Image (tube, helix red, strand yellow):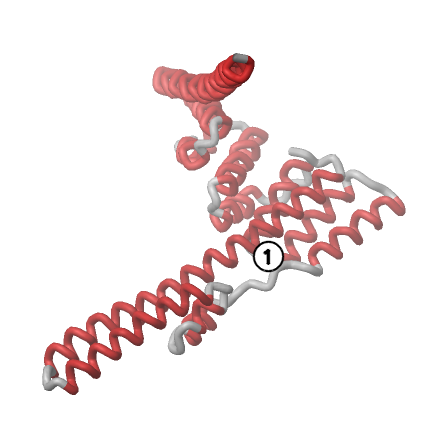
Amino acid sequence: MHRTLLSFIISISLSAAFSAEAQERTDWALKAVEFERAAFYAEDPREAAEALAEKANCYRQCGRFEEALATLERIGLYQLPSERVDDVLYEKELCSYLAGDWEGAASYMDEAGVSATPRRLLLDALVLGGCARWDESLAKAVELVDLRYEGEERETARQELRDLYARVPKLKKESQAVLRSFLPPLGHSYTGHLPEGLIAMGFDAAAVGWIVWQCLGGNWITGILGGGVVLNAAFMGGMERSISLIDEYNRDALAGFNAVLQDVLRSHEFAE
Protein backbone atom coordinates (compact mmCIF):
# COMPACT_ATOMS: atom_id res chain seq x y z
CA MET A 1 0.00 0.00 0.00
CA HIS A 2 2.79 2.39 0.97
CA ARG A 3 4.74 1.51 -2.19
CA THR A 4 1.67 2.20 -4.35
CA LEU A 5 1.09 5.52 -2.63
CA LEU A 6 4.75 6.50 -3.04
CA SER A 7 4.66 5.64 -6.75
CA PHE A 8 1.50 7.70 -7.14
CA ILE A 9 3.12 10.73 -5.44
CA ILE A 10 6.28 10.44 -7.57
CA SER A 11 4.21 10.20 -10.74
CA ILE A 12 2.28 13.34 -9.83
CA SER A 13 5.51 15.21 -9.01
CA LEU A 14 7.18 14.24 -12.27
CA SER A 15 4.08 15.10 -14.26
CA ALA A 16 3.95 18.50 -12.62
CA ALA A 17 7.63 19.13 -13.32
CA PHE A 18 7.40 18.19 -16.99
CA SER A 19 4.16 20.13 -17.36
CA ALA A 20 5.83 23.22 -15.91
CA GLU A 21 8.75 22.86 -18.33
CA ALA A 22 6.40 22.37 -21.27
CA GLN A 23 4.33 25.35 -20.15
CA GLU A 24 7.44 27.53 -19.94
CA ARG A 25 8.49 26.53 -23.47
CA THR A 26 4.96 27.14 -24.72
CA ASP A 27 4.91 30.56 -23.11
CA TRP A 28 8.13 31.57 -24.87
CA ALA A 29 6.75 30.30 -28.18
CA LEU A 30 3.53 32.26 -27.66
CA LYS A 31 5.49 35.36 -26.79
CA ALA A 32 7.46 34.93 -30.02
CA VAL A 33 4.18 34.94 -31.96
CA GLU A 34 3.08 38.09 -30.15
CA PHE A 35 6.31 39.90 -31.00
CA GLU A 36 5.99 38.80 -34.64
CA ARG A 37 2.54 40.32 -34.67
CA ALA A 38 3.92 43.51 -33.10
CA ALA A 39 6.64 43.68 -35.75
CA PHE A 40 4.07 43.20 -38.53
CA TYR A 41 1.78 45.98 -37.31
CA ALA A 42 4.53 48.39 -36.21
CA GLU A 43 4.37 51.71 -38.03
CA ASP A 44 7.90 52.74 -37.10
CA PRO A 45 10.79 50.65 -38.54
CA ARG A 46 12.70 50.91 -35.27
CA GLU A 47 9.75 49.49 -33.34
CA ALA A 48 9.54 46.60 -35.81
CA ALA A 49 13.26 45.93 -35.41
CA GLU A 50 12.97 45.90 -31.62
CA ALA A 51 9.99 43.55 -31.79
CA LEU A 52 12.00 41.14 -33.94
CA ALA A 53 14.88 41.34 -31.47
CA GLU A 54 12.50 40.37 -28.67
CA LYS A 55 11.09 37.54 -30.77
CA ALA A 56 14.61 36.21 -31.32
CA ASN A 57 15.21 36.35 -27.58
CA CYS A 58 12.08 34.26 -27.02
CA TYR A 59 13.35 31.62 -29.44
CA ARG A 60 16.74 31.60 -27.73
CA GLN A 61 15.14 31.16 -24.32
CA CYS A 62 13.41 27.98 -25.47
CA GLY A 63 16.47 26.61 -27.25
CA ARG A 64 15.42 27.29 -30.84
CA PHE A 65 18.72 28.91 -31.75
CA GLU A 66 18.54 28.59 -35.54
CA GLU A 67 15.11 30.22 -35.60
CA ALA A 68 16.41 32.96 -33.31
CA LEU A 69 19.29 33.62 -35.69
CA ALA A 70 16.96 33.63 -38.70
CA THR A 71 14.79 36.22 -36.94
CA LEU A 72 17.79 38.40 -36.13
CA GLU A 73 18.82 38.29 -39.79
CA ARG A 74 15.55 40.03 -40.64
CA ILE A 75 16.54 43.10 -38.66
CA GLY A 76 17.90 46.00 -40.67
CA LEU A 77 20.78 47.24 -38.54
CA TYR A 78 20.51 50.69 -40.11
CA GLN A 79 17.15 50.99 -38.34
CA LEU A 80 18.78 50.78 -34.90
CA PRO A 81 20.91 53.22 -32.90
CA SER A 82 24.60 52.34 -32.78
CA GLU A 83 24.49 50.96 -29.22
CA ARG A 84 21.74 48.52 -30.21
CA VAL A 85 23.62 47.37 -33.31
CA ASP A 86 26.33 45.89 -31.09
CA ASP A 87 23.68 44.11 -29.03
CA VAL A 88 22.09 42.54 -32.11
CA LEU A 89 25.47 41.46 -33.48
CA TYR A 90 26.27 39.91 -30.11
CA GLU A 91 22.98 38.01 -30.18
CA LYS A 92 23.71 36.80 -33.71
CA GLU A 93 27.13 35.56 -32.62
CA LEU A 94 25.66 33.90 -29.52
CA CYS A 95 22.80 32.17 -31.35
CA SER A 96 25.12 31.00 -34.11
CA TYR A 97 27.54 29.59 -31.54
CA LEU A 98 24.76 27.86 -29.61
CA ALA A 99 23.42 26.42 -32.88
CA GLY A 100 26.82 24.83 -33.48
CA ASP A 101 27.88 27.07 -36.38
CA TRP A 102 31.19 28.27 -34.92
CA GLU A 103 32.56 29.64 -38.17
CA GLY A 104 29.38 31.62 -38.67
CA ALA A 105 29.66 32.96 -35.13
CA ALA A 106 33.23 34.06 -35.87
CA SER A 107 32.01 36.02 -38.89
CA TYR A 108 29.57 37.96 -36.70
CA MET A 109 32.37 38.53 -34.20
CA ASP A 110 34.56 40.05 -36.91
CA GLU A 111 31.66 42.19 -38.11
CA ALA A 112 31.10 43.59 -34.63
CA GLY A 113 34.70 44.74 -34.29
CA VAL A 114 36.55 45.29 -31.03
CA SER A 115 34.55 45.27 -27.81
CA ALA A 116 35.92 44.88 -24.28
CA THR A 117 32.74 44.05 -22.38
CA PRO A 118 32.96 40.87 -20.27
CA ARG A 119 30.11 39.10 -22.07
CA ARG A 120 31.63 39.85 -25.48
CA LEU A 121 35.12 38.73 -24.46
CA LEU A 122 33.78 35.51 -22.95
CA LEU A 123 31.77 34.66 -26.06
CA ASP A 124 34.63 35.62 -28.39
CA ALA A 125 37.06 33.38 -26.50
CA LEU A 126 34.67 30.43 -26.83
CA VAL A 127 33.91 31.11 -30.51
CA LEU A 128 37.60 31.36 -31.38
CA GLY A 129 38.28 28.22 -29.39
CA GLY A 130 35.60 26.41 -31.40
CA CYS A 131 37.36 27.55 -34.59
CA ALA A 132 40.77 26.37 -33.28
CA ARG A 133 42.10 29.93 -33.44
CA TRP A 134 44.02 29.31 -30.25
CA ASP A 135 46.20 32.43 -30.03
CA GLU A 136 43.26 34.76 -30.60
CA SER A 137 41.11 32.83 -28.14
CA LEU A 138 43.82 33.03 -25.47
CA ALA A 139 44.18 36.76 -26.05
CA LYS A 140 40.44 37.26 -25.48
CA ALA A 141 40.47 35.07 -22.36
CA VAL A 142 43.47 36.95 -20.93
CA GLU A 143 41.79 40.27 -21.67
CA LEU A 144 38.73 38.97 -19.83
CA VAL A 145 40.55 38.00 -16.62
CA ASP A 146 42.46 41.28 -16.77
CA LEU A 147 39.14 43.02 -16.15
CA ARG A 148 38.69 40.99 -12.99
CA TYR A 149 42.10 40.98 -11.31
CA GLU A 150 45.14 43.08 -10.59
CA GLY A 151 48.70 42.35 -9.47
CA GLU A 152 49.58 38.79 -8.47
CA GLU A 153 46.01 37.55 -8.87
CA ARG A 154 46.02 38.72 -12.48
CA GLU A 155 49.29 36.92 -13.23
CA THR A 156 48.01 33.73 -11.53
CA ALA A 157 44.84 33.80 -13.64
CA ARG A 158 46.87 34.47 -16.79
CA GLN A 159 49.17 31.53 -16.05
CA GLU A 160 46.19 29.25 -15.51
CA LEU A 161 44.95 30.16 -18.98
CA ARG A 162 48.39 29.69 -20.53
CA ASP A 163 48.59 26.23 -18.99
CA LEU A 164 45.16 25.38 -20.35
CA TYR A 165 45.98 26.55 -23.87
CA ALA A 166 49.24 24.61 -23.76
CA ARG A 167 47.05 21.49 -23.75
CA VAL A 168 44.79 22.32 -26.70
CA PRO A 169 43.53 19.21 -28.52
CA LYS A 170 45.55 17.92 -31.43
CA LEU A 171 43.15 17.87 -34.35
CA LYS A 172 43.10 15.19 -37.01
CA LYS A 173 43.75 16.05 -40.66
CA GLU A 174 41.30 15.17 -43.42
CA SER A 175 44.17 14.63 -45.87
CA GLN A 176 45.61 11.96 -43.59
CA ALA A 177 42.23 10.21 -43.38
CA VAL A 178 41.95 10.13 -47.19
CA LEU A 179 45.50 8.83 -47.59
CA ARG A 180 45.07 6.12 -44.97
CA SER A 181 41.72 5.08 -46.43
CA PHE A 182 43.53 3.52 -49.37
CA LEU A 183 44.63 0.82 -46.91
CA PRO A 184 41.53 -0.15 -44.92
CA PRO A 185 41.04 -0.02 -41.97
CA LEU A 186 43.74 2.61 -41.36
CA GLY A 187 41.39 5.48 -42.24
CA HIS A 188 38.91 4.49 -39.53
CA SER A 189 41.58 3.61 -36.96
CA TYR A 190 43.06 7.12 -37.38
CA THR A 191 40.15 8.41 -35.29
CA GLY A 192 39.93 5.40 -32.99
CA HIS A 193 37.22 3.47 -34.88
CA LEU A 194 39.18 0.33 -35.65
CA PRO A 195 36.21 -2.12 -35.28
CA GLU A 196 34.20 -0.11 -37.81
CA GLY A 197 37.23 -0.07 -40.08
CA LEU A 198 37.54 -3.85 -39.88
CA ILE A 199 33.93 -4.18 -40.94
CA ALA A 200 34.55 -1.85 -43.88
CA MET A 201 37.61 -3.90 -44.81
CA GLY A 202 35.45 -7.02 -44.68
CA PHE A 203 33.08 -5.55 -47.26
CA ASP A 204 36.02 -4.65 -49.51
CA ALA A 205 37.45 -8.16 -49.16
CA ALA A 206 34.07 -9.70 -49.93
CA ALA A 207 33.76 -7.61 -53.09
CA VAL A 208 37.25 -8.62 -54.23
CA GLY A 209 36.47 -12.24 -53.44
CA TRP A 210 33.30 -12.06 -55.53
CA ILE A 211 35.25 -10.66 -58.49
CA VAL A 212 37.88 -13.40 -58.29
CA TRP A 213 35.28 -16.17 -57.85
CA GLN A 214 33.19 -15.01 -60.79
CA CYS A 215 36.19 -14.51 -63.05
CA LEU A 216 37.57 -17.99 -62.22
CA GLY A 217 34.17 -19.40 -63.14
CA GLY A 218 34.25 -17.65 -66.49
CA ASN A 219 31.65 -15.03 -65.55
CA TRP A 220 33.81 -12.09 -66.49
CA ILE A 221 31.06 -9.56 -67.03
CA THR A 222 29.26 -10.43 -63.78
CA GLY A 223 32.50 -10.47 -61.86
CA ILE A 224 34.08 -7.32 -63.18
CA LEU A 225 30.96 -5.18 -63.55
CA GLY A 226 28.96 -6.42 -60.58
CA GLY A 227 31.90 -6.85 -58.26
CA GLY A 228 33.47 -3.62 -59.43
CA VAL A 229 30.34 -1.66 -58.61
CA VAL A 230 30.14 -3.19 -55.13
CA LEU A 231 33.87 -2.68 -54.49
CA ASN A 232 33.72 0.92 -55.61
CA ALA A 233 30.69 1.60 -53.40
CA ALA A 234 32.30 -0.11 -50.40
CA PHE A 235 35.71 1.50 -50.90
CA MET A 236 34.43 5.02 -51.57
CA GLY A 237 31.87 4.68 -48.80
CA GLY A 238 34.65 3.75 -46.40
CA MET A 239 36.67 6.77 -47.48
CA GLU A 240 33.71 9.13 -47.04
CA ARG A 241 33.04 7.62 -43.64
CA SER A 242 36.66 8.19 -42.61
CA ILE A 243 36.33 11.86 -43.56
CA SER A 244 33.09 12.23 -41.61
CA LEU A 245 34.76 10.62 -38.58
CA ILE A 246 37.48 13.28 -38.81
CA ASP A 247 34.83 16.00 -38.61
CA GLU A 248 33.17 14.30 -35.64
CA TYR A 249 36.47 13.76 -33.86
CA ASN A 250 37.62 17.35 -34.29
CA ARG A 251 34.25 18.80 -33.33
CA ASP A 252 34.10 16.69 -30.17
CA ALA A 253 37.67 17.68 -29.31
CA LEU A 254 36.95 21.38 -29.76
CA ALA A 255 33.68 21.15 -27.81
CA GLY A 256 35.51 19.38 -24.98
CA PHE A 257 38.18 22.08 -24.83
CA ASN A 258 35.54 24.82 -24.85
CA ALA A 259 33.67 23.13 -22.00
CA VAL A 260 36.85 23.19 -19.89
CA LEU A 261 37.58 26.79 -20.91
CA GLN A 262 34.06 27.86 -19.98
CA ASP A 263 34.39 26.19 -16.56
CA VAL A 264 37.71 27.95 -15.96
CA LEU A 265 36.33 31.35 -16.89
CA ARG A 266 33.22 30.77 -14.79
CA SER A 267 35.43 29.98 -11.83
CA HIS A 268 36.58 33.62 -12.12
CA GLU A 269 32.93 34.74 -11.79
CA PHE A 270 32.32 35.29 -15.48
CA ALA A 271 29.12 33.26 -15.61
CA GLU A 272 27.31 34.87 -18.57
Quadrant holding the C terminus? top right
Percent position of residue 30, x then y: 40, 17
- Tell me which residue sits at (59%, 44%) in the image: 113
Percent position of residue 218, x then y: 10, 86
- Tell me which residue sits at (52%, 12%) in the image: 1
Side (left or right) of 202 relative to 88: left
Q: Nearer the viewer, residue 16 or 147?
A: 16
Which residue is situated farthest in the right direction here?
A: 152
Side (left or right) of 67 relative to 13: left
* SS of the residue under disc 1: loop
59 in relation to 149, above or below: above
Q: Quarter of the image holding residue 238? A: bottom left
Percent position of residue 194, x then y: 46, 67
Which residue is situated farthest in the front direction here?
A: 1
Q: Nearer the viewer, residue 37 or 230?
A: 230
Identity of the amino acid at label 1? Arg
On the image, numbered disc 1 is attached to which residue?
A: 133
174 in relation to 35, above or below: below
Percent position of residue 87, x then y: 56, 32
Q: Nearer the viewer, residue 138 or 228?
A: 228
- Tell me which residue sits at (59%, 57%) in the image: 133
Can residue 24 be seen at all in this image of the molecule? no
